[in-house]
Image: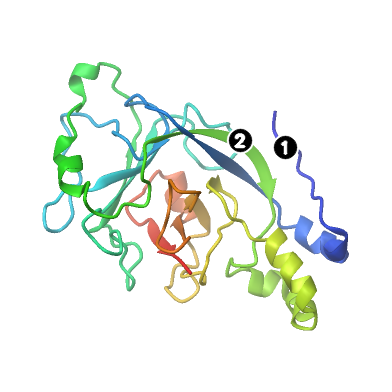
Amino acid sequence: MFETKSLTLPKEVEQFHHIIEETLQPVIGIETYERETTLFDSKFAGNPYFPLAMEYPKNEQQQPLKLLAQINFADVPKHLANFPEEGILQFFIDGYDDVLGMDFDKGNNQSGFRVIYHDTIIKDESQLMHDFSFVESTTEELYFPVEKEMAISFQAKFEPLTMGDFRSNELYKSIETAIDEDEELADVLYDVLAGDGHKIGGYPFFTQEDPRAYGNYTDSTTLLLQIDSEGDHIMWGDCGVCNFFITEEELKNKDFSNVVYNWDCH
C-alpha cells in the first residue's frame, strides 16, 4: 500500500503548508535487516551479483572495490518515474581510500567508485562469481561505512523538498526569510524538512551543503540512492550521509557513467 500524496505538518509551520506541499515527490524509503543474503538480493554490503564474464571493478591501483549497495528492482515498488523496473543496480566504493573513493573536485569521477547496472539477470549461478575473498581479505582491516551485510526492504512514500537541497534557495525564499527572524521556527522546519534516512528518489539530506550547487552538477536532480548513518552498523565518518545523483535524461537512458557521488559528515 502506497502512502498517499498528502502532507501533515506541525502547527508551528502549517503557515507554509501550500509552499511545501507543492514540492512533494515520490520516494522509496529503505529499511535494513541484519541477515545473510543471496547473490540476487537487494542489500547493503555483502557479496554482489557478478557474472564471471565481466571484469570486476577496481581502483586506479588495481585494487578491488567493495560492494556498498545492491538494488534488485524486482523488489522495488513501481513508484518512481524513469527508474528501472527490473535488473540490478550496484554501487561499489574504494575501501582502501580514506575518503572512500570520492573525488572532491570531480564528483562524477568513477576511478574510486563504480555504478554498474545489469539489465539482464543470469539465473544460472554457475556463471556467477561466488568467491569474493580477494575483496574481503584486503579490506577487512580498513574502514568501511557499512560494517555488516544487511538485507533491505522498500516502502513507497512521498516527501517534500529538503532544506539542504540547493533548489530550496529559490523555492523556499519566503520560508528562509521567516526562519531568519525566528530561531525556534527554524529548528522545527529543519527537522521536518531534513530528508535523512536511507532512500531512492525524493530529496537529499546533507550534514554540510549540497555539492551540486558549486560543482556544476545542477542538472543531476535525481537522487539515485542515499545511505545515511544508522546506529552502530552504518557510519559515514562522524555520523554523516552518502548520496548518489544522476540527471533525468541519463536515468531514462540507463546511463550510469556520470553519476555524482558525495558523502559528508559533521
Q: Secondary structure at mark 1?
A: loop
Q: Looking at the rendering, which quadrant does residue 89 occupy?
A: top left
> Residue at the location (23% across, 58% down)?
111
Q: Secondary structure at mark 2?
A: strand
Residue 158 position in % (x across, y down): 68, 45
Q: Which residue is mark 1?
A: 3
**Residue pushed farthest left?**
62
Residue 177 visible in rendering:
yes
**Tally of marks:** 2
Does 191 appear above or below 69? below
Rate crowding at label 1 as few (under 14), some (14 to 19) or many (20 or more) other CA atoms within 10 Å: few
Residue in front for this viewpoint, 50 or 171: 50
Residue 31 position in % (x across, y down): 54, 38
> Residue at the location (51% across, 53% down)?
223
Q: How is the image coloured?
A: rainbow
Does 91 appear above or below 37? below
| Lower position in the chain sequence, tag 2 or tag 1 | 1
Residue type at the position of mark 1: Glu
Q: Looking at the rendering, which quadrant does residue 157 occupy?
A: top right
The image's mark for residue 155 is 2
Give the side of residue 63 with respect to residue 110, left or right: left
Q: Disc 2 versus disc 1: distance between alpha carbons?
A: 9 Å
Residue 218 position in % (x across, y down): 50, 68
**Residue pushed farthest front?**
232
Please say if the residues under marks 2 and 1 sit with CB atoms less than 8 Å apart. yes
Residue 174 visible in rendering:
no
Give the side of residue 106 with respect to residue 204, left or right: left
Rate crowding at label 2 as few (under 14), some (14 to 19) or many (20 or more) other CA atoms within 10 Å: some
Residue 260 position in % (x across, y down): 39, 60
> Residue at the location (38% across, 59% down)?
261
